[in-house]
Amino acid sequence: MHNETASDRELLYEEQYKRAQKEQSFMRKLLRNKLAAFGFFVMIVLVFTAIFAPWIATHPPHQMDVTRTLLGPGEMGHLLGTDSYGRDTFSRIIYGARISLIVGVAAVVFGAVFGSLLGVISGYFGGKIDAIIMRIMDGMMAFPFILLAIVLMTVFGQGLMNVIFAIGIANIPGFARVVRGQVLSVKEADYIDVTRSLGAKNTRIIFHHVLPNSIAPLIVYATMAVAGAIISEASLSFLGLGVQPPTASWGSMLQEGKDYLVLNPELATISGLAILITVLSINLFGDGLRDALDPKMKI
Amino acid sequence: MKGFLLRRVLQIVPTLLVVAIIVFLITRIMPGNPAAVLLGPQASVEDIEAYAQQLGLNDPIISQFFQYIINLITFDFGNSLTYNQPVITLLIERFPNTILLALSALVIAMVIGVPAGIIAAKRQNSFIDYLVTTFSLVGVSMPIFWLGLMLVLFFSVNLGWLPATGMGSFDDGLWAGLRHLILPSIALATIPAAEFARIIRSSMLEVVSQDYIKAARSKGVHEFFVICKHGLKNALTPLLTVIGLQFSNLLGGAVLTETIFSWPGMGLLIVDAIERRDYMVVQSTVLFIAIIYVVINLIVDILYKVVNPKVNLDTGGGK
């Protein structure tokens, strides 16, 4: 085993110092980006809206009233009107934020955990393992994202958990590619050689050195992926493959709005705007994150 | 070049095989009996058993897989239970409609996105640059199914200018065909147009500060030629990559766009099949689209090599 020398220690300290410096400069850059700050602010508002939905909503989201169907905004105490079952549109939009954010975050966490694991194994060990994993990922990426999710939903069936799984699985290859690329560039660094020569095991090297140094693009990619997952959930619900009715989801509200486009255009307009604003704010924040971390990052 | 072509064609074989394995596994991991799922809830036990026999579900999994691959090679995608015809017949019927829509969207996206990106880069930090950047950010965040509905609401319901649904025949005249194509193409073109504008802008920004561009300008070359001949030529390679990637979005987006505009393509076929619980059609159509996507990316890679012969695309193993 290689004995730890002063120069080895210096190299490891240098790695930690560089990482800390990078973090400081990153925060400065991010805070200076007004669009990213705006995106972050909207995201925070959405998260609070989702958490405090029962206090913000003016009516229970599933409460039907056949005497108050397809009301326009402001009519009979309904801020944004009602749908064809007489349910309050404003309250359903507020509760819909929960579904969008839960699916967006959970599906991306699922995809990130499994995708990163595959990416690390593929990039770190290389050889046949790498070839096999990446061929499988290539095959999965040959399916347009939404179509892969559709096929998986036809197998799993409707429901919140199934939507999370389907979108999460469809997210795996993207994360695997990003992480693998990072691992390939990090694993040849001098400090990794030093750690290895000091007798560190592969798992320690991966989790203590390779992954922390690959995290920046992973965070940017994950942020963008949340936006994609929210659109995918809305798309699946719009096609009638998402969460089960009567759960309030922006996609299913849009699907209903499509049938009442002439009688009640507000329903489709408002639910679509909710999706657009959410996705736009996440993308603004994601763009800001990328620029702050590394403007040349290819994500 | 011949060697490159052969190698590149051979490289897609494992990807296609993985695509086939994924769809095969998905049909086999369905909870319960796949035959029962494919036949739907109304099927009797006898029907399910007979269909399982017909699909070879009682055979060992390996022989099932080989039979599946042989069927695919011979373009046997199975039979639709609700349309009562081979799935390949449905695909051949719908495929040209989806390609027409996707290509129209691609053309619109390029006509809008490429000049927008060039103008934004030429006038960096100007009002027009901010406008293009903002629109492209909104564009990539756009739920296209919502945009489609808003286009219908505005142009069909309110103004009555264009039809909301269906597909016109070009046999009845150019306008008869075009008027049905305009709204779905615009809806589908939004995301690629935004992506193209972003890519072209950043590629052009890298190029315009290069010495050879300054040299061309100092020689008195007209700005139009400086941009088109020198600038765009270098932005073409990243643009081609994005076109390849966007085709996946176009084919995926077609599912949603065709649903809104009742455009009789493969996307609407999938959605109709989902409603009819005709999963054989769903899975075969998705498989077919994945194959098309792989082939389109092969063509893009070949074009890549034609545009820029120095590019080395012969990457073995994982890239």
Image (cartoon, grey):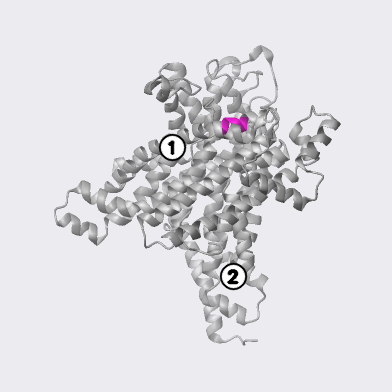
Subunit bearing disc 1: B
In the figure, residue B266 lies in which quadrant? top right
Image coordinates of residue B52 in percent, x first then y, are 80, 39
Residue extending furthest toward the front: B74
| Kind of residue indicated by mark 1 | Leu
| A174 up-or-down from A51: above or below | below
Image coordinates of residue B262 in percent, x first then y, are 54, 25
Tag of residue B103: 1
Q: Secondary structure at mark 1?
A: helix
In the figure, residue A251 lies in which quadrant? top right
Image coordinates of residue B149 in percent, x first then y, are 50, 26
Q: Residue at x 38, y 54 (%)?
A: B237
Residue extending furthest toward the left: B220
Left of A186 or right of it: where is A105?
A: right
Camera-nearest residue between B39 and A107? B39
| B200 up-or-down from A116: above or below | above
Residue extending furthest toward the top: A67
Q: Main secondary structure of the magenta part?
A: helix
Are there few (<14), some (14-19), or many (20+) residues within 10 Å of tag 2?
many
Left of B240 or right of it: where is B50?
A: right
What distance separates the C-alpha of mark 1 from that of mark 2? 46 Å
| B287 up-or-down from A270: above or below | below
Magenta region: which residues?
Answer: B266-271
Q: Are marks 1 and 2 on the same chain?
A: no
Left of A255 or right of it: where is B205?
A: left
Q: Residue at x 22, y 51 (%)?
A: B226
The answer to whether residue B48 shows anywhere in this view is yes
**Circle 1/circle 2 CB separation < 8 Å:** no
Q: Secondary structure at mark 2?
A: helix
Camera-nearest residue between B128 and A281? B128
Tag of residue A209: 2
